[in-house]
Image (cartoon, rainbow, N blue to C red):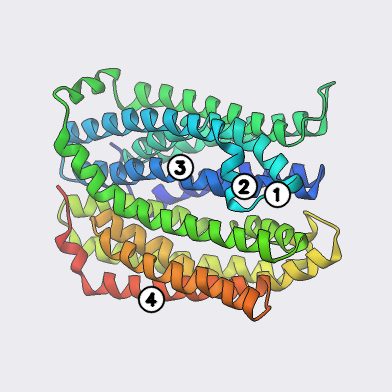
Amino acid sequence: MKKMTLFSLSWPIFIETALFMALGLVDVFVLSRYNDLAASSVNTANQAISICTLVFTVLSTASAVLISQNLGANKNKEASRIAALSITFNLILGLIISAVLAIFSRPILSFIGAKGEILEFATEYLIIVGGFLFTQGLLNALAVIIRNYGYTKLSMYVTVIMNVTNTVLDVIFVLGLFGCPQLGVKGVAIATSVSRIVGMIVLLVVLFAKIEKPSMFKLLKPFPFKDLWLLLKVGVPSAFESFNYNISQLVVTSIVLNCLTDIELITKTYISNISMFFYIFSVSIGQAVQILVGHLCGARKYDEAYKSCLRAFKSALIIAMCLELVGIIFRYQLVGIFTQNQEVIQMGAMLIIINIFVEIGRTTNLTVISSLRGAGDVFFPTGVAIFSMWLVSTLGSYILAVVFGLGLNGLWIAFAADECLRGALMLWRWKKGKWRTKVLV
């Protein structure tokens, strides 16, 4: 296991996260050259996929916490057993979810509220990407294991390979280069699935060449029910927090599909993709500090863990605000990358200004909740999320966007209120220090 610092962990995760986000952004960008509604349909289908991938989050998030704490406590065999358990269950659950999405793609999307051309495009996408979603489950499990052993650079390199594969295939399949027919949404789905398969294979090779041996799976005999219970104890509350977020966003998407215009749907799609790059550093710093706090708590170095969280939070907030300010200055140009529709550009430019308040709260949540999770304190963030995401974000979105007629501006104001409320409560929890009693190993 390599020696770890916040910087050594976070910069490769940042590049990996940027490239991973770019996978989706490239899909939307290429499709925007093909058809605006096709680009929006992929975003709609991904709402359903995001909910399903939360099942993988249960085990991946929990295994990250337990592996890091066991390694911090020098319990290497226990860490290996947790890793084997995570890979096995993610594969089994992934195959089940893939079958469900491939078979019931159209009813799922109709339930969300997709109709017309969006429904047709989204169904094409979901059948293919959903049918191969088990590869994402394995990717999650493998990446978590590799990162928590300190090899964040290796995980980053694999994402580079995936990104190049996805981009090349996107351009070929969607735009019909080299004699290939224009496949549109179907082409994006094939490119996404192939890139994930490539990434999964490479990560397996990396895992067994650098970190573990295939014999790790022998540690599952006799079956470690105690470890499974710990995984569920940590993973279910953590995943339920993400589940609430994705379900609430699904409801918001349904509000947009049913109550707002196609122009507003297209604008939301583009701004959602642009805003990812405002919090990209926060995501990477949050993942890095979770690993670091987990190791420190496993070694019972609580004061060092406390300071690490606050340093990570301050660094992430400064960077996020700088990126957001640059985004505000170049807001028209950013939206103009995706479309020449002046109505979309004007609407999107206003959302980028409002988004600064979203990022203040989101940065706090991404870093402090990750630290709480690394320490094993998972129930408090989930409880707050249930209250805030539904009453403030979802209900607030409907009231402001539809009842008061504020449209997308109303959605973003509700998002900002939710993120800032939760962020303030997470900081209070960290400073109170209750997380010091939640260590699992």
Q: Position of residue 83 (x, y in %)?
A: 28, 33
Residue at horizontal 21%, vertical 20%?
218
Q: Residues within 10 Å of mark 2 (few under 14, many from 20)?
A: some
Nearer the N terminus, badge 1 or badge 2? 2
Q: Secondary structure at mark 1?
A: loop
Q: Secondary structure at mark 3?
A: helix
Q: Is residue 330 at least partly visible in the picture?
A: no
Q: Which image quarter: residue 169?
A: top right
- Read off the residue under disc 1: 115
Nearer the N terminus, badge 1 or badge 4? 1
- Read off the residue under disc 2: 110
Q: Residues within 10 Å of mark 1 (few under 14, many from 20)?
A: some
Q: Is residue 389 at least partly visible in the picture?
A: yes
Name the mark nearer the viewer: 3 or 2: 2
Q: Secondary structure at mark 2?
A: helix
Residue 424's label in the rendered image is: 4
